[in-house]
Amino acid sequence: MVIGLGSFIGGISRFALGRFVQSAAHSVFPWGTFTVNILGSLLIGVLFGLSLKGNLISTEWKLFLIIGICGGFTTFSSFSLENLELLKAGHLTPFFFYATLSVMGGLLATFGGYMFTRLW
C-alpha cells in the first residue's frame, strides 16, 4: 500500500513536471523527460545516502520515498521510446545528446545526491 501510494504520487508528479517543462521548452529535444530523470536521479541519490545514515529514514519511509515516489517519478521506458522516435525522425544530433546527457547526467546526479549526504 505504501509503495502504491508513493508510485501514484511519483507518477502524477512525473506527468505534471514533464509536461510543464516540455511545453515551456518549445523544442524537439525531450526536455520534460530529461528533467524528470535527472531530478529523480538526484533525489534517489539523496534518499539512498540518508537511508545509510542510521535511523534517519525508517523502512516504511524508505519504501514510500525510494521505491514508491522515485520509482513512479523516473521513467527510462519513456526515455527509450523518445530516443527511438528521435532516431526514426532522423534527428540524430538531438538523439545523441539526449541519450548521452541523460545517462551521464543521471549517474552524476545520483552520485552527487549521495555525496551531498556524506557532507553531514
Image (cartoon, helix red, strand yellow):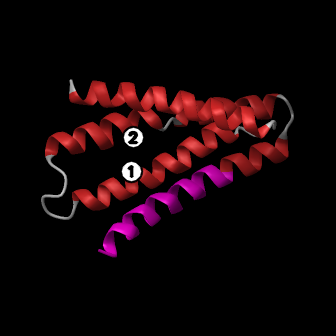
From the image, tell me which residue sits under label 2.
70
- 115 falls in the magenta region: yes
* Residue under numbered circle 1: 44
Q: Amino acid under label 1?
A: Ile
96 relative to 41 in the view: left or right: right
The quadrant of the image that shows the N terminus is top left
Labels 2 & 1 near each other (Cβ < 8 A): yes
Give the SS element for disc 1. Answer: helix
Residue 10 position, x and y percent, is 41, 32
Query: Visible in this render: residue 83?
Result: no
Residue 3 percent location from the top left of the image: 26, 30
Q: Amino acid at mark 2?
A: Cys
Residue occupying the point 30% across, 61% down: 49
Among the 4 quarters of the image, the one containing residue 70: top left
Q: Residue at x 32, y 31 (%)?
A: 6
- Report the magenta residues as a range: 100-120
- Image spot of residue 61 (x, y percent): 21, 42
Q: Is residue 15 magenta?
A: no
Bin the neighbour count of mark 1 within 10 Å (Cα to Cα): few under 14, some 14-19, many 20 and up.
Answer: many
